Amino acid sequence: ILENGKLDLPDAVLAEADWVLASIHYGQNQSEKQLTRRILNAISNPYVDAIGHPTGRLIGKRKPYPVRLDDVFKAAADFGCLLEINGQPSRLDLDEIAAAAAKERGVSLVLNTDAHSVDELRFMQYAVFQARRAGLESKDIANTRSLAQFRRLLRRG
């Protein structure tokens, strides 16, 4: 998600993808209003399936950036956009409190490893632990389903 709120690929390219996960990777020092607007713009894009590491935290290195999570949860539920629970040990984002709040507001979540190598695929267990701490069940997690069921959850179903 670019600093101006647009995505870094055009919709024509995104439309060709099987799966689109949009994330903020720079510009985290913007205001709460700007950061929230960026995420809401991505959520409203019909080709975005999920928002990755929604608060951008890096445990012990960077606090979560300021974002109005209630607005993000409402938009995600309204648009059918998934939110990620990132199992990378330095992220664990969403945290368990935010993940539980997302569930309460009708948001489906997806577990992810944020793997940058094959060895990091083992981080999925940490995403599972984070979901369990949030009180989530398999029915709350999109990628506990069969591929056919998972695809039906996506807006492009």
Image: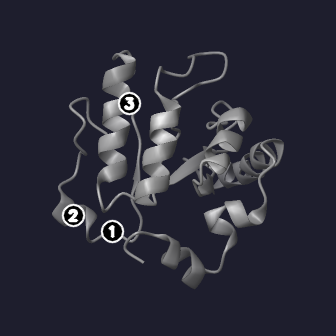
Tag 3 residue: 36
Number of the front mark, 3 or 1: 3
- The one nearer the camera, 62 or 100, is 100
Image position of 62 (left or right of 88): left
Left or right, 10 with respect to 56, comes to: left
The crowd level at tag 1 (other Cα within 10 Å; few <14, some 14-19, many 20+) is: few
Identify the residue shown where x is 31% and y is 39%.
1
In the rendered structure, which amino acid carries the disc numbered 1? Ala
Residue 97 image position (x, y, % from top left): 71, 33
Nearer to the camera, 84 or 90:
84
SS at mark 3 in the image:
helix
Residue 13 disc label: 2
Please state if 138 lies on the left or on the right of 111 as rendered. right
Count residues near mark 3 (Cα–Cα under 10 Å), then give few for <14, some for 14-19, many for 20+.
Answer: many
Asked if labels 2 and 1 touch by Cβ distance under 8 angstroms, the answer is yes
The alpha-carbon separation of the residues under discs 3 and 1 comes to 25 Å
For label 1, the residue is: 17
